[in-house]
Image (tube, grey):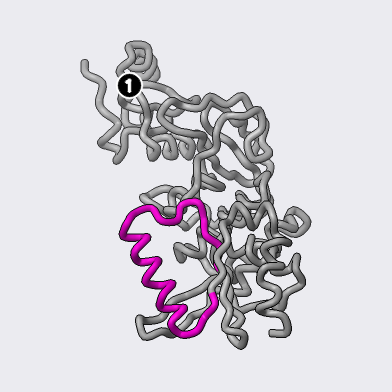
Amino acid sequence: MRLPPIHHLGHPVAPRRLLLEAGISHYRLRTAVASGRWQEPLPGVFVSHSGPLTRRQRWQAALCYAGAEAVLSHRSALLAWGARVDEAGRASRVAGVRGRYAVPTEGGLVEITVPHGRHLLSRAFVVVHQSRRPVPPDRVVDRLAVAPPARAAVDVAVTAGRRADVDHVVADVLQRDLCTVGDLEVEVAALGRRSTSWLRQAVADARRGMRSVGEADLRRAVLAAGLPEPEWGAAVETPRGTFFVDALWRRRGVAAEADGAAFHLSAADWAGDLLRQNALQAVGLVLFRFPVRRLRAEPLACGLELAPHVAGA
């Protein structure tokens, strides 16, 4: 007798409970897995095909494994919302959670959060976080329970090992309009003592109008040299249209920008950048540009280059 597919339940991934309710016996489940037609990537979670799982199937399997009240969180949640972030890779401790992880060949680890007190082990490709802060269960992406973007961003930020990673995740969710600065401030306040100085600074910079990692690096150069605070993300009107600069001392007619490593990816990008620069210079603006790498390596030197032009602004 042929084994009925899981697909009639709406997806190729299902927990044991649903399959038993659908009339599939324990024996037939064991037989399907033993024969290689199905697989059981996590205890009590079955997939009705062999071979690699898609990312969505890994997410679904992780949520089936964790059960009610679990949500995709941290990097997995940000990916579900469309943010630019990498999945967690294998380590003895992932985002503060110990485990013997097995990274699948087709992708990285899946991070989920369950209420505090549920002693669910992290295993295989699933990283289980516990939280005393309730996670709204009504946020859904592609029929999967997902933590809100602001919550996921601050959770990633407090487990980051580099300041640049904190700046990146905060800037990315804001640039993509996944949340507001106010949403981030609420989540930071809810963290209490778990909040880090890096995260608080990144959110404070965002409140000033800064929306990129490069701007955060540029501000550190400005502070290192003791320069007056500029307008961040300021608009400049030109005959060619309105352009935005990272930092602007408007009374002095001086602007500064942080150029990332991914700049000038094509001839069209380069041509557009030249047009923009010429338009800014045409209205009398003096434009300084600093590579992000130099801003990080020599913040004081970069700030001192600006000092004669913006002092007293």
Seen at 66% across and 78% down, the residue is 309
Q: Residue furthest left?
A: 1
Looking at this view, is 183 or 307 the one in front? 307
In the rendered structure, the answer to whether residue 279 lies left or right of residue 11 reads right
Q: Residue furthest bottom?
A: 251
In the rendered structure, the answer to whether residue 313 lies left or right of residue 78 reads right
- The answer, for residue 69, to whether it is visible in the render is no
Image coordinates of residue 43 in percent, x first then y, are 50, 25
Seen at 54% across and 69% down, the residue is 180
Q: Quadrant of the N terminus?
A: top left
Question: Within 10 angstroms of label 1, few (less than 14), some, or many (20 or more) residues?
Answer: few
Looking at this view, is 92 or 129 the one in front? 92
Looking at this view, is 68 or 302 the one in front? 302
Vertical side of 143 occupied by 52: above or below: above
Seen at 46% across and 66% down, the residue is 177
Q: Quadrant of residue 264?
A: bottom left
Q: Which residue is mark 1?
A: 50
In this picture, which residue range is highlighted in magenta? Answer: 257-286
Seen at 56% across and 47% down, the residue is 74
Q: Quadrant of residue 56?
A: top left
Image coordinates of residue 225 in percent, x first then y, are 75, 68
Vertical side of 19 occupied by 276: above or below: below
Label 1: which secondary element: loop
Image coordinates of residue 241 in percent, x first then y, are 37, 81
Query: Is 294 contained in the magenta span?
Result: no
Looking at this view, is 184 or 269 the one in front? 269
The amino acid beneath tag 1 is Ser
Image coordinates of residue 268 in percent, x first then y, are 31, 60
